[in-house]
Amino acid sequence: MTDKRMFSLKIVDSDLLLDMPLSSQCLYFHLSMRADDDGFVNNPKKIIKIIGANEDDQQILIAKGFVIVFDQGIIVITHWKINNFIRKDRYKPTMYIEQKQQLYQTENGAYISEEKVGCHLVNQRLSSGQPSIGKGRLDKVSIDKGRREKENQVAPVSFYGKYQNVRLT
């Protein structure tokens, strides 16, 4: 874990963060300062007690999507990769590999939990960095099936209305 941390103004200046009570904002900053190089914190209750916050502040961070909590009490800062960039020669991987494998990363770098992922094609698994459904999973039958469905669709016949902007099939 390094001694220096960064915060993105895109996150810090967001109305979502600024609408929270100051104690919740403070907890977010302290959790971020004590997170490992992948954004994981294994002692959030200790940090809550040190800074004088309470469990409600953590629940607000969870509800607003600033942290994700795992069953073991470990949390991860959702916007960690947006806030921080750590050079490869200084990076130390997290020891919470099992929890990290339960996360996906969006295009902008935010973590999302496995249960909130709707479409596995869009998101990437953090464990391998590869799309969860690759080209190898598409076979000729499924490709041909998609083509046949497109061919069977009826094209729109004509436009109606005063300005010819209503299309009926």
Image (cartoon, helix red, strand yellow):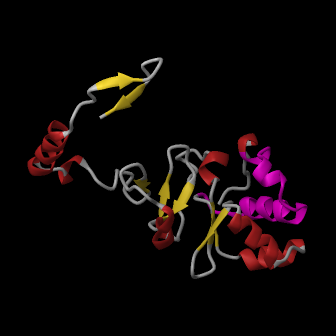
In the rendered image, residue 36, in percent from the top left (x then y), is placed at 63, 62
Quarter the C terminus occupies: top left
| Tally of numbered discs | 0
In the rendered image, residue 74, in percent from the top left (x then y), is placed at 62, 75
Q: Which range of residues does the magenta coloring cover?
A: 11-37
Q: Nearer the viewer, residue 116 or 145?
A: 145
Tell me where residue 28 sits by quadrant: bottom right
The extreme top residue here reads 163
Residue for point 84% across, 77% down: 54
Q: Nearer the viewer, residue 113 or 88?
A: 113
Whether residue 164 is situated above or below residue 67 in the rendered picture: above
**Residue 12 lies in magenta, yes or no?**
yes
Whether residue 158 is situated above or below residue 30 in the rendered picture: above
Residue for point 50% across, 44% down: 107
The extreme front residue here reads 162
Residue for point 84% across, 78% down: 49
Q: What is the chief secondary structure element of the magenta stretch?
A: helix
Tell me where residue 63 sits by quadrant: bottom right
Quarter the N terminus occupies: bottom right
Q: Is residue 31 left or right of residue 137?
A: right
In the rendered image, residue 102, in percent from the top left (x then y), is placed at 46, 68
Q: Is residue 92 visible?
A: no
Q: Nearer the viewer, residue 153 or 163?
A: 163
Q: Is residue 53 visible?
A: yes
Residue for point 65% across, 74% down: 42
